[in-house]
Image: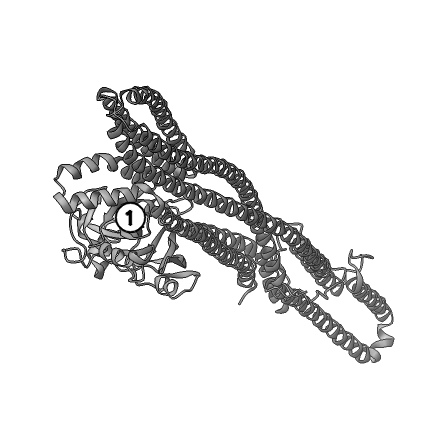
Amino acid sequence: MNIGKKLLILFLIVGIVPLSAVSLISLNQSTSALSTQAINQLSSLREVKKLQIEKYFENKLKLMEDIPKNLRFANGMKDFGEAFHSGGLESSAYKDFLSKHHEGLDTFNRVFSFYDVFLIAPNGDVVYTVARESDLGTNLISGPLSNSGLARVFKKSKSGTVFEDFSWYDPSNEAASFIATPLMDAKGNYIGSAAFQVSLGDINAIMQERSGLGKTGETYLVGSDKLMRSDSFLDPVGHSVKASFADPANGKVDTDASRESLSGITGAKVLIDYTGGTVFSAYTPVKIADQKWALIAEIDEAEALGPARDLRNTILIIGFIGVIIIVALGLMSARTISAPLVEVAGKLSTMSHGKLKQDLVVVKSNDEIGELGKVFNEMLKSLQVFLKSSSEILAGNVSKEQFGLQGDFEESLQGMLKQAKEKIENDEKIREQEALQRTQKAEQDERERTLAVEQAEAERQQAEKERKEAEELQAKVNSILEVVSSASVGDLTRSVTVSGADAIGQLGEGLSKFFNELRNDLGRIGQTAESVSAAAEELTATSATMSANAEETSAQAGVVAAASEEVGSNVQTVATGSEEMSASIKEISSNATQAAKVSSQAVEITRKTSGTINVLGDNSKEIGEVIKVITSIAEQTNLLALNATIEAARAGEAGKGFAVVANEVKELATQTAKATEEISQKIQMIQESTGDVVEAIGEITEIINKTNDISNTIASAVEEQSATTNEMTRNVSEASKGVSEIAENIAGVSTAAQETTHGSSQTREAAVELSKLANDLQSLVSKFKV
């Protein structure tokens, strides 16, 4: 293989090998970084969705604790049950109760975002629903829905609040999930159940929020039967909840992610999804009451690694262009370097065959190759002058004293010149003494032959010396090529030992200096790697800051939970106050009944006494004025309850519980106004029907005393009711403070979360830059052996 091909191969190795190594390392690192980023992002999204779903159902189940204390449900159950069992859904009594209770129950359904609300009698009759689908009026024990999810949740609800997982529900023509809780009367007797159909729209709203999911990402829920519990974003036709339950064979999600998460494993990895595609998947189990679901967050591998694919294509294009450039430069350089060397080698070969009559080498550069050509030309000129001068001397031309040569060439010619001059002098002496020296001619001829032999031997030795010098030159060139070849594969341990004053020696010294500086540069690169290590320590500090922010977020969340518990406690106190109010009203009602009986006896007696009746008439007018005051108070109470409902609606989620209490107070105020109106009418009748005065004033006095005692009892009960009302007001105030504290803490949580997000972004950017720098340095240093 000639030197041109060797140089071309050397250029290709030096150019392509580092380029390929850096390209492969960069591609692998970018792919690994993108994979890690996709897994981390999906894992974070998975945890957020899990918290949202569990909190959603936790709030729904906690809401069930207040349902048995809510008069709207208890009164509605009682009224709808009696009307349905006495006259059916089309009876006037049922319609009257529907106009009375439907608005409040429908408001509750909308405020707390259920799909439907059911009131179910103890015998299984569905006596009321908000949506009024085909399940209204059916019996859940013996009717067509006896095997439905609603029937199962009703049968289990008699002992407490229960949750029923999704199953197909014909009245809604889709899969449905239910929550049910028992309803009790004032004595604690079971009077029926309130059931609530969970809104699939709320679940989809949580799971289909698409921040950070790109074009092919999605999050979805899978039940223990491996059917969908939320609609798929990517396949809404085949893998919606409705489609999944309608066609279980094709709607199931039986993947590694669903199987592992349903078995209690939380993980994240690359796997095959339900469509048969390769995805990055993060999954975890979710516990809803006594049910276990799988929450899965996925994104297509091709989209997640799209930047790496683009980088690979860019690297291939750059590499292809680089190879073309390297080949072109290699050919040009190899041709530039090898052509003069080949020409010199050819002329040396010709010279080795004794042919010195040839043209000089054309020198086109001033580098080491050019110097080699100049040296060869000088050597060729010296040989040509030497041979020409030798011929002239041998021809008898001894007029020159100097030949313009150096070293051995000049010394040899001077020797030959001296010998020639001596020969000429001898010849002259011989001619002068020809006669005397003829006897010596044979000896002189012999000496001349000896000199000719010695001259030929000297010429042969000179040619041998020149051949050895050419071999030494070739050996030095080969030694330099061996060191350069080792360097091309990363071995810098070998040194260039060629030196000297000639062109090749200067080339060897220059290369030796270059490789020494290269080894020093690699040492400095190692020091740069230490700087990268220091930057990594700074990243550790940033990570610590992020951890502190996360702890702050956790603490704020704890305070929010405590404030929420306080609100729940206060609402419980309000409910208790409502119960005490109810008991007091019952006592008032009982005493009022007894007073009515006594008043009836008094009426019989006052018929006998006209004077007493007149007094009673006056008293009746005063009672009428009091009733007007009570009516006015009831109207104001109704107005205040309406305002409270409006304010609770403005408060949003935190005011839902107060909206329920305000509606109950409004209903009680309406009933009080109706009762006072009836009393007013009766007093008017008493005033109009006053008759003659009868005897028995003593008996009237006794009855009036009894009436007075009863009035005292009523007053006492009213005072108790007032105290209870005050306590309720105070607790509502405390609940309002708790809500304010929740708002403040939530603001703190938001601030800490923003700080954590900012720190995470800085950490990720620094990590990418440092990782890229460290890997580039390591890959470069590892290629060389110093």
Which quadrant is the C terminus positioned in? bottom right
How many callouts does the rendering have? 1
Q: Amino acid at mark 1?
A: Phe
In the rendered image, which quarter is residue 751 located in? top right
Task: From the viewer's side, name the closer residue of 426 and 721.
Answer: 721
Residue located at (24% from left, 56% from top): 149
Q: Is residue 436 above or below residue 404?
A: below
Left or right: where does residue 79 sit relative to residue 722?
left
Query: Where residue 532 sits in the image (x, y, percent)?
Result: 65, 54
Residue 87 in picture, x, y percent from top left: 12, 43
The vertical placement of 275 against 118, above or below, is below
Above or below, comparing residue 176 to residue 412 in the picture = above
**Residue 701, horizontal then vertical, whole percent:** 35, 30
Q: Is residue 306 visible?
A: no
Q: Would you say 533 lies left or right of 103 here?
A: right
Q: Residue 559 at x, y = what percent?
A: 54, 46
Given residues 697 and 224, the one toward you in this image is: 697
Q: 702 and 489: which one is in front?
A: 702
Quadrant of the image occupied by residue 144 = bottom left
- At a point 66% along the width and 64% down the height, the residue shown is 492
Mark 1: which secondary structure? strand
Instruction: From the image, tell me which residue sits under label 1.
Output: 196
Q: Is residue 206 visible?
A: yes
Mark 1 Cα-neighbour bin, 10 Å: few <14, some 14–19, many ≥20? many
Q: How is the image coloured?
A: one colour
In front here: 577 or 714? 714
Is residue 601 left or right of 386 when viewed as pictured?
left
